[in-house]
Amino acid sequence: MNVDDARMNNNGKTSTPVTVIGLGLMGRSLAAAFLAAGHPTTVWNRTAAKAEGLVADGARLAPSVADAVKASPLTIICLTDYSAVNGLLADDALDLSGTTLLNLTSGDSAQAREAARWAEQRGVRYLDGAIMAVPPSIGTAEAVILHSGPQADFAAHEATLAALGTASYLGEDPGLASLYDVAGLAMMWSVLNAWLQGTAMLRTAGVDAVTYAGFARLMAAGVAEWLPGYAEQIDRGEFPAEVSALETDVRAMDHLIEESEALGVNAELPKLFKAMADRAIAAGHGGEQYPVLIEEFAKPGPA
């Protein structure tokens, strides 16, 4: 197949061929979404049996990686880690000139940048990405796929990538998708851990988790409304106490710790909050607003 070819799908619209390499749960979901959107889809996996369902739905199973990348102008790679990606692409005889590689394998920003350097040295078009979704949501607007790397390469395939969900472009730095990914995980675990802290406390009074969850959602949504204003303070480097000073917040943290301990509930999480706030106050920031703690987060942690 000429990789510049495009086919007409059942709706009479042009559909670009795509290749998906790696058919774990996520890889199979990616390929299925492309098929559902009418894109001629080629797949490859070390264990060919994982492709059976996709082939039954119209995918083509490539006999080799080389054949797979030749089949499409866009090749999605979704493997276990970057070591697996490096091993797969290590063959110098592998011709990647006719396709854009989009690596959706989970890794860190240093690995993403190294992969981009490898691709640039070989004249290969390369985008790095991160999937902010679970496999069942792929193909819906709820599935957010982050992309970073050359904007022209993203723009060339943006319409095709829309088959997977909401395609978000972050910038030229190939490490940005990985950084956003882990930053999102920090938000996720912080919210969940805070909710679990409150749930453990309220259970001592006979309040079940379902009942508290409704109130917790309101709290989380309310706090989220503060983020744009707090972000402006961080970017300016100025933290006037418009709502509350950090030294006032610390008194509330003391109350949270004392209440947790009195209830027999683990207080490690609120003690961590307070330890960071205490250091900021000791550095002279007690009269400033909570986002001044960015100075503590920006430092290396204790060894």
Image (spheres, helix red, strand yellow):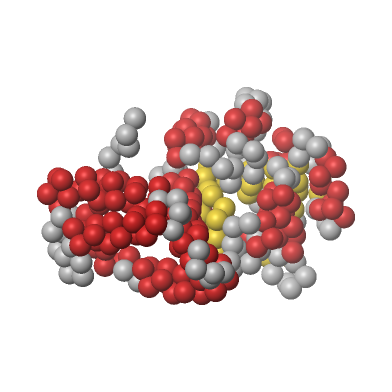
Q: Is residue 185 left or right of residue 64?
A: left
Figure check: 254 above or below 110: below
Q: Nearer the viewer, residue 187 or 68?
A: 187
Q: Nearer the viewer, residue 224 or 78?
A: 224
Q: How far across and how far down the image is residue 24, in percent?
A: 72, 45
Quadrant housing residue 110: top left
Image point (44%, 74%), residue name:
218
Quadrant housing residue 66: top right
Q: How far across and how far down the image is residue 132, in percent?
A: 55, 56
Figure check: 216 above or below 40: below
Quarter of the picture containing the C terminus is top left
Q: Nearer the viewer, residue 228 or 283?
A: 283
Image point (15%, 55%), residue name:
286
Residue 213 visible at all = no
Q: Is residue 102 left or right of residue 217?
A: right
Residue 37 visible at all = yes
Q: How far across and how far down the image is residue 136, in percent?
A: 69, 60
